[in-house]
Amino acid sequence: MLHPRVRPRRLRATPAMRRLVAETRLHPAELILPMFIREGAAEAQPIASMPGVVQHSLDSFKAALGEAAEAGIGGVNLFGVPEHHDAVGSGATDPEGILNVAAEIARHEVGDALVIQTDLCLDEFTDHGHCGVLDEAGRVDNDRTLVRYAEMAVAQASAGAHLVAPSGMMDGQVAVIREALDEHGFQDVGILAYSAKYASSFYGPFREAVDSQLQGDRRTYQQDPANRREGLREATLDLAEGADIVMVKPAMAYLDVLAEVAAVSDVPVWAYQVSGEYAMVEAAAANGWIDRDRAILETLTGIRRAGADAVLTYWAVEVATRLLDR
């Protein structure tokens, strides 16, 4: 009878052995919680397509910030849900606009205990739902949009953001934002660049979360899901323009892009586990088709294994609490 000389199963024999030889580990500090703050809300409002996620009122937002800090996660990524919209997204640069107010509250409530990140994009604030200013033909005007992004960056930094997160996929956005921040004395405010952001079907629930006014689609500025090299090119351009962190979004369907970006980047690489990815797991678990807790950890571990140094995920606080309780 022949016996195998190599027995990899030895390293899987017990829970202690598997834990000892694990190549990829999750840690609370590597998790970032996206949060939605709704202007004028008297209390937290559930998001139907994202069970367990809410649009926060200012009061519920303060409480959730405390929970996030106590759980030891790395940071929070803030999105504003304004009451009013217009063609140029005026609320994005208004010091009293909901996103800037939320950033100021977050800095006051948790200080430097969490990294406070603000979404730097116009889509939540425009009446057409696009990420930029439209020209006379109804197309997104890249360079006019950059002017608004520079103004947004200064407004968000003034409100207390540690990181501004341009997510609109405008050409040259990182360079323009870096210049604006430096000119206004915000050299210490970093840029989290949404570098490889794809025109994905997995953003569906997010549209509900931010009360999107989108007309049409975003395929002229977000990337074609068919293109791998393009994602690497976009990340390389952002690195050259001064991005402090680059990100791939969505995460799970773009692990190849994530791995390639991580292989060449000399700054941290993050990934965003988006609303549709969250909703799929929650829906399948609700139907009894998968083990929810195992699926959550498996998806996050896969994203980290592919090269993400940190992950934006709606399960951030839940997972961090589970990790701390182990």
Image: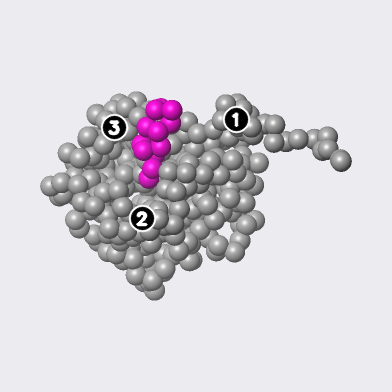
Magenta span has 319? yes
* Place of residue 7 in the rendered image (x, y in percent of width and height, measured from the top left): 76, 35
Please give the residue where the numbered disc 2 appears in the rendered image: 286
Q: Which mark is residue 14?
A: 1
* Place of residue 235 in the rendered image (x, y in percent of width and height, measured from the top left): 57, 47
Residue at 33 percent across and 66 percent down: it is 214
In the displayed structure, would residue 250 be above or below residue 154? below
Instruction: Please count the marks in the image.
Output: 3
| Amino acid identity at mark 1 | Thr
| Amino acid identity at mark 2 | Ala
Choose mark 2 or mark 3, whichever is in front: 2
- Closest to the observer, 266 or 136: 266
Looking at the image, can residue 276 be seen? no
Q: Which mark is residue 67?
A: 3
Specify start and end residues of the magenta stretch as a single range: 314-326
| Amino acid identity at mark 3 | Glu
Structural distance between the alpha carbons of marks 3 and 1: 34 Å
Instruction: Decide which of tag 2 and tag 1 comes sooner along the chain.
Output: 1
Q: Quadrant of the N terminus?
A: top right
Check disc 3 and report its element: helix, strand or loop.
helix
In the displayed structure, would residue 162 be above or below residue 241? above
Residue at 29 percent across and 64 percent down: it is 213
Instruction: Decide which of tag 3 and tag 1 comes sooner along the chain.
Output: 1
Crowdedness near tag 1: few (<14), some (14–19) or many (≥20) residues, C-alpha within 10 Å: few
- Closest to the observer, 139 or 18: 18
Query: In the drawing, does residue 217 fall left or right of residue 159?
Result: right
> As drawn, which residue projects farthest toward the right?
1
Q: Quadrant of the C terminus?
A: top left
Magenta span has 123? no
